[in-house]
């Protein structure tokens, strides 16, 4: 494909500086549920003011611009290595323009690369499909929420969680309880049931691309999502752990097959700065979208 670097830079800019419409609407609804003058209401007011300023000034919604996770669906015959090289160039340019904070630190030396490029960074997932459209989804996942993401192995005797959906419910509630005051609540939970330890975490993060207002096509998982959303908010943790009616504003669950000996539940906790954006290249046209646009 021809050079798409400028379009890729714009994708990064939008993800970092322009919060998705469904997330902003959820934050406003959460603010309106809190008592006027409460710490929770004040926290939401500050968050929403920050969202407005970031969009107007093309500055990051959060100072931690996080790990960049790209999901690339490409047409047959596309040059994957060239696509990755252009995406990496775009990340370095977006960092130079301050859409991103330099976040790639060499684990052995402690040295920051200065351009968000390094071993394993950014994260790329490439998938060939039959469409002639190039589609790139980008998720920015901050370090604070990544630190409280977690994985459980069922059965969990301490939580009395068995190998069933009620066991899944118990460990997800525990994950939210353990994260209180950390991870920059309110959060969105991407949950994966099954897989192995590695695929579970990847699949859990994929759930974070789902629109907040969608319904799981699996009726049992849809019911579990609805119940967990209600019960997480009944914990009363609230924004930033200040207390309040909204601790989580989305629960998205996917299920993989698993080995008989294994039953993993992976929880990808996402902070209120739930940053994601999509770019589609259709012929010569670049089409950008975010949930709620």
Image (cartoon, grey):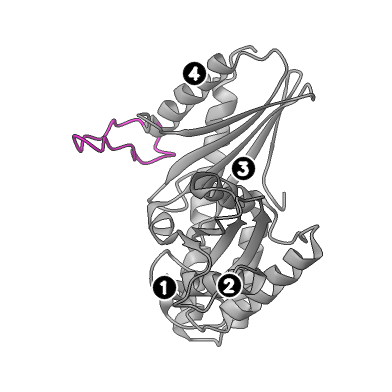
Depth-wise, is mark 4 or mark 1 nearer the camera? 1
Q: Position of residue 260 (x, y in %)?
A: 61, 54
* Residue 109 magenta: yes
Q: Position of residue 184 (x, y in %)?
A: 43, 65
Residue 245 versus residue 280 in the image, above or below? below
Q: Within 10 Å of the Cα at label 3, are there few (<14), some (14-19), or many (20+) other Cα atoms?
A: many
Q: In the rendered structure, which disc, 2 or 1, sits on the residue that comes first in sequence?
A: 2
- Stretch of the chain drawn in magenta: 97-115
Q: Which secondary structure lies at badge 1?
A: helix
- Taking the view exactly as shown, the residue that stands out farthest to the front is 261
Depth-wise, is mark 2 or mark 4 nearer the camera? 2
* Residue labelled with disc 4: 85
* Residue 258 magenta: no
Left or right? Give the position of 56 relative to 137.
left
* Residue labelled with disc 1: 178
Determine contact: label 3, label 4, CB under 8 Å.
no
Depth-wise, is mark 1 or mark 3 nearer the camera? 1
Q: Which secondary structure lies at badge 4?
A: helix
Regarding residue 56, the answer to whether it shows in the image is no
Residue at figure coordinates x 45%, y 47% from the top left: 60
* Residue labelled with disc 2: 162
Q: CA distance from mark 4 to mark 1?
A: 39 Å
Q: Position of residue 208 (x, y in %)?
A: 61, 53
Left or right? Give the position of 215 relative to 5.
right
């Amino acid at each position: 494909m021809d050079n798409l670097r400028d379009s890729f830079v714009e994708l990064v800019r939008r993800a970092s500086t322009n919060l998705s419409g469904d997330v902003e609407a959820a934050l406003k609804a959460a603010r309106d549920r809190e008592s006027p003058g409460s710490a929770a209401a004040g926290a939401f007011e500050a968050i929403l003011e920050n969202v407005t300023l970031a969009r107007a000034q093309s500055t990051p919604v959060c100072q931690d611009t996080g790990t960049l996770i790209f999901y690339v669906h490409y047409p047959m015959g596309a040059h994957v290595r060239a696509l990755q090289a252009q995406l990496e160039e775009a990340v370095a340019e977006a960092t130079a323009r301050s859409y991103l904070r330099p976040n790639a630190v060499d684990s052995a030396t402690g040295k920051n690369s200065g351009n968000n490029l390094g071993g394993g960074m950014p994260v790329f997932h490439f998938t060939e499909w039959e469409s002639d459209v190039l589609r790139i989804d980008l998720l920015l996942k901050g370090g604070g929420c990544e630190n409280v993401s977690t994985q459980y192995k069922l059965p969990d005797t301490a939580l009395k969680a068995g190998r069933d959906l009620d066991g899944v419910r118990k460990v997800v509630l525990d994950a939210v309880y353990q994260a209180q005051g950390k991870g920059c609540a309110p959060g969105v939970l991407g949950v994966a049931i099954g897989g192995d330890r590695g695929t579970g975490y990847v699949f859990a993060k994929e759930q974070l691309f789902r629109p907040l207002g969608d319904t799981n096509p699996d009726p049992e998982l849809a019911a579990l999502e609805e119940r967990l959303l209600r019960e997480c908010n009944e914990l009363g943790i609230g924004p930033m752990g200040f207390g309040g009616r909204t601790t989580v504003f989305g629960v998205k669950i996917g299920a993989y097959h698993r080995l008989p000996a294994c039953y993993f539940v992976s929880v990808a906790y996402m902070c209120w700065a739930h940053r994601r954006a999509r770019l589609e290249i259709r012929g010569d046209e670049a089409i950008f979208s975010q949930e709620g646009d």
